[in-house]
Image (tube, rainbow, N blue to C red):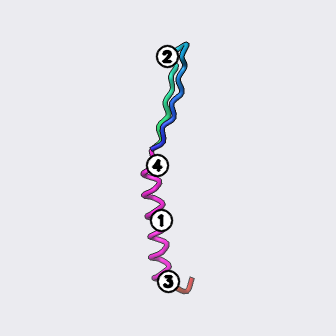
Amino acid sequence: MIKYRKQNALEPEKDAELSVNLTPLLFFAVGFVITKALLGSVRPGR
């Protein structure tokens, strides 16, 4: 997870925080690579 926080000392109500969770992207990438490897082993002609 990546977190970015921007603080405004003069106006604390304008503080901003951005949080990005990369776990779903990691699962997708691993699944994609495994699927390509399985398909490559089933169809070696391509």
Name the residue that disc number 1 marks: 32
Three-letter residue code for mark 3: Arg
Name the residue that disc number 3 marks: 43
Residue 30 placement (x, y as % from top left) = 45, 63
22 inside magenta stretch: yes
Residues at marks 2 and 4, CA–CA distance in whole angstroms: 28 Å
Three-letter residue code for mark 1: Phe
Report the front residue among 37 and 7: 7
Q: Which numbered disc, 2 or 1, marks the residue that appears first in the sequence?
A: 2
Name the residue that disc number 4 marks: 22
Q: Which numbered disc, 4 or 1, marks the residue that appears first in the sequence?
A: 4
Name the residue that disc number 2 marks: 12
Q: Tags 2 and 3 in contact by the CB under 8 Å rule?
A: no
What kind of element bears circle 4?
loop
Viewer-side label of 2, 3: 2
Viewer-side label of 4, 1: 4
Residue neighbourhood size for the residue with mark 1, other residues' Cα within 10 Å, grouped as few (<14), some (14–19), many (≥20) = few
What kind of element bears circle 3?
loop
Q: Tags 3 and 4 in contact by the CB under 8 Å rule?
A: no
Q: Which residues are magenta?
A: 21-43
Viewer-side label of 1, 3: 1
Name the residue rendered at 43%, 52% in the picture: 24
Q: Which numbered disc, 1 or 3, marks the residue that appears first in the sequence?
A: 1
Three-letter residue code for mark 2: Pro
Three-letter residue code for mark 4: Leu
Residues at marks 4 and 1, CA–CA distance in whole angstroms: 15 Å
